[in-house]
Image (spheres, coloured by chain):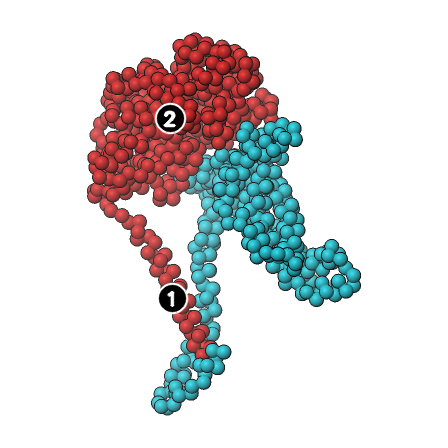
Chain colours: A cyan, B red
Amino acid sequence: MSLSATTAPPSRGAPTKHTQPRRRRGYSRFTKLDMKYSPYLYVAPFFVLFGIFGLYPMLWTLWMSLHDWDLVGTHTFIGLENYSALLSDDYFWNAVRNTFGMFVLATVPQLALALFLANLLNRPMLRARTFFRMAIFVPNVVSVAAVAIVFGMLFQRDFGVVNWFLGIFGVDAIDWRREWWSSWIAISTMVDWRWTGYNTLILLAGMQAIPRDLYEAAAMDGAGPWRQFWTVTLPMLRPTFVFVVILSTIGGLQLFVEPLIFNNGNIMGGTQREFQTVQMYMFENSIHNLSRAGYGAAVAWALFLMIVVVSVLNFVITRRSVK
Amino acid sequence: MSVSTRRRRYAAVALATVAALATTTACGDDNEGGSSDGAKPEKLVVDTFGEAGYEDLVKQYEQQTGIKIELRKVAQLNEFRPRVVRSLATGKGAADVIMLEEGILNEFKLNPGNWVDLAPLVGDLSKDYLSWKYELGKAPDGRLMGLPTDVGGLGLCYRTDLFKDAGLPTGRDEVSALWPTWEKFIETGQKYKQATGKGFVDSVTTAVNAVLFQQNGGDLFYDKDDNLIADKSPAVKAAWDQAVAIADAGISAKITTWSPEWNAGFKQGTFAVNACPSWMLGIVESNSGPENAGKWDLAAVPGGAGNWGGSWLGVPTQSKHQAEAAKLAAFLTNTAGQVAAFKKSGPLPTNLKALEDPSFQSFTNKYFSDAPTGKIFGEGVQKIVPTHLGPKHQAVKENALEPALRAYESGQANAAKAWEQFTKDAATQGAF
C-alpha cells in the first residue's frame, strides 16, 4: 500500500534533468552495498554480544582447564591432567548421575503434563481460552530463587506443608534432604512447577499449526478425539516435541539454583552429595575451593560436551523423524 | 525505489544501534575510575556475616565524619566466603572493609597481596589487643592483614522455660553444675528427652564444634607447618568420638545448623540447648524473636573453656579508599567500638581496654534473663589458648567433618563409613 502511495508523484526528478543520473548512480551503488552487507549488520549485534559474553568466556574456560589454576593466586600449565583426574573422580560421576536422574524425573512427567494441558487448551469449545493460556505461563515469570525458597519451606522436615499433608494419611515425616529419591522428587517438583506452562505454550503453538482439514478428514472417517490425538496430533507435533525436548535437556543439565537453595546454600547438595548436580560440582571446585579453579573449568567443559552430545543426538533423531 | 529507501533507513538504524552499543561498552570502564586515595570518599562499604553488632556504630561514624557507610550483612559464613573470593578473583566488587573469620583468614593469608598492610595506616596498635589475636592477624610476609574484632569464648545457651517443663533446674549456676563433663551433659539430655520427647541439643554439629574448639592449643586439621593431619589428629578424633556419643544417645534434634529449620527451631522450641560462643548470642536473639525474650539463659560449657570463631577486619587492596577504610576498621575495633558491638550482639572484645571497661564487665544481657555475659565471657577470655587453624580449616570443617557426622546421625552411614567419608573429603577440601 505504501509502495503505490510513494511511487505516485513523478515530479521528483523532473526539474533538474542532468543531475539525476549521477544521483541515481551513487544511489544504486549504495543500494548494492546495502543489499549485500546490511543483513550482516542486522545480525551483528547478536554476534558481537555472543562473542563477548559467550565465546570469549568459553575459550577462556578451556584455557583455564589446562592449568592448575588458583583463583586468587598462581597458574601452572598442566595439559590434560585435570581431565584425566575427572574421569576417575567419584564425586564427578555422582554429580553426572544426579543431574541425569533429576533431568529424567523432572522432564518425563513435565512433558506428559504439558502435552495433556496443551491438548486441553487447544479445544475449540474452551471458554476463556486466553485467560487459561496466560495463567499457565505465570509460574515461569516468578524468579527461580523465590520458587526454590518457597518450595524449600514446603519440603521442610519439621514444619513443612508437604509432610503435614502426608501426615494426614499416616505417613511419617520425611526428611526430604536426606535421601536421594526424596530430594530428587522435591527438586523435580520445583522444576516442573516452573517449566510445565512454558512447554505447554510451545506445544500448543505446534498444535495450532496442524491443518484443521486433517482433523475433519479424520472425523469423517469416524475417528474420535482420542484416536485423533494419537494418529493426527502426535505425529504432526513431533518436530515441536523434539524442540521442546532439546530445550529441556539444555536447561535440565544446567540445574543449579533449585538444588543449591534447597540445601540452604550449601554447595555440596546433601550430606552425601545426594543431589549435587554437575553445575554445582563445577561451582564447588572453581569458586568454593579457591585453589581448584582449573579443575572446575574442566568440569565446565565436560558439562558443555555432555550437552553437545545430547543435543546432537536429539538433532539426529529429529532429522530422521521429519524425513 | 521506496522499498530501498526504507531499507536504507533500516540500515541506518542498525548502524546507529551498533555504534551505540560500541560506545556503551567503551564507556563502561570509565565509571569505575573513581577518586584517588587522598580525597575523602563519599561512601565506604563494610561486609560482615552473622551479627557483628555494627548497626549503631556505623551511624555514629557517619555523623562524626560525614562519610556514608553501607553495611552489608550475610547470615552465613558459607555464603559470605564465596562473595569475598569472587570479588578478589575478579578484582571488582569487594567492600572497603571486610570481616574475616578465623576459619577463612588463613586461606586468604596464602595470597596476602590482596590485602592492605594496615600497620602503616593505623599506627602501632599491637599493645591494644590480646597479643596472640593481634599476631594472628599478620600474614606470613609480615603485613597486618586484619585488626582483631572478637574471640568466641564458649558457653551453652539454654531455654529456662523448656528446662522447667522437663523438671530440670533453671538457674544458670545449677544448670552449669549439671554438666561438668560431656558425659553428664548426655545424661541430662536423656532426662530431658524422656520427659519431653523432643531433641535436647540442636544438632550434633554444634556439639562437635564446641568440643573441637576446646582442644586448647592442640592441632586440629593441620599441624603447625600446615600439613593436613585431619585423619590422624587426636583432637579431631576426640571431638568426633564425643559427637558420635551424642548422636548415639539420640538427644539431638537432628537439625542442619544454619538452615531455615534451625532458625525456626529457636522460635518453636524444637531444642532446648545450643552451643553459644559469645557471637552466637546475637544470632540466638534474632532467630528466637522478641516473643522469646527472657526465656534463654547462658550456662558454662561442659569440659572447660574454649574458643570458637572470632574475626578480624581487613581492607582489600582493590579498595579505592584504603586509608579511610583502615580508619573505619580501627574505629570499629577500638575500645568503645568493641564494647558497643558486644552490648548489641555479643561478639566478645579482644581489645584489652574494652575487656577492662567497667561497662563491659558489669554488662548483663537483658534478652538472656539478665545473664552477666560481660563477667562470664570476660573471665574466660584471658584463659584462651590460641589454636592453630590451617589454610582450609573452614572448608574441612564445613564440607567434610559436619556432613559426615550428619550422615552418621541420620543413619545413612555407620561409624566406620562416616569416618571414611570424612577423611576422604578432608583430603580434597583441605588441599591448597
Residue found 71% across the figure and 63% down from its top:
A215
The quadrant holding residue A123 is: bottom right
- The residue closer to the viewer here, B60 or B139, is B60
Residue found 40% across the figure and 70% down from its top:
B12
- The residue closer to the viewer here, B430 or B322, is B322
Q: Residues within 10 Å of mark 1 (few under 14, many from 20)?
A: few
- The residue closer to the viewer here, A13 or A304, is A13
Q: Give the mark toward the camera: 1 or 2.
A: 2
Picture coordinates of residue A251 (x, y %)? Answer: 56, 48
Residue B100 position (above or below residue A279): above
The quadrant holding residue A318 is: bottom right
Picture coordinates of residue A118 (x, y %)? Answer: 63, 54
Q: Amino acid at mark 1?
A: Ala
**Residue at far front of view:** A127
Check disc 1 and report the residue beneath it. B16
In terms of secondary structure, where does tag 2 sit? helix
Q: Chain of mark 1?
A: B
Check disc 2 and report the residue beneath it. B282
Q: Which mark is residue B163?
A: none
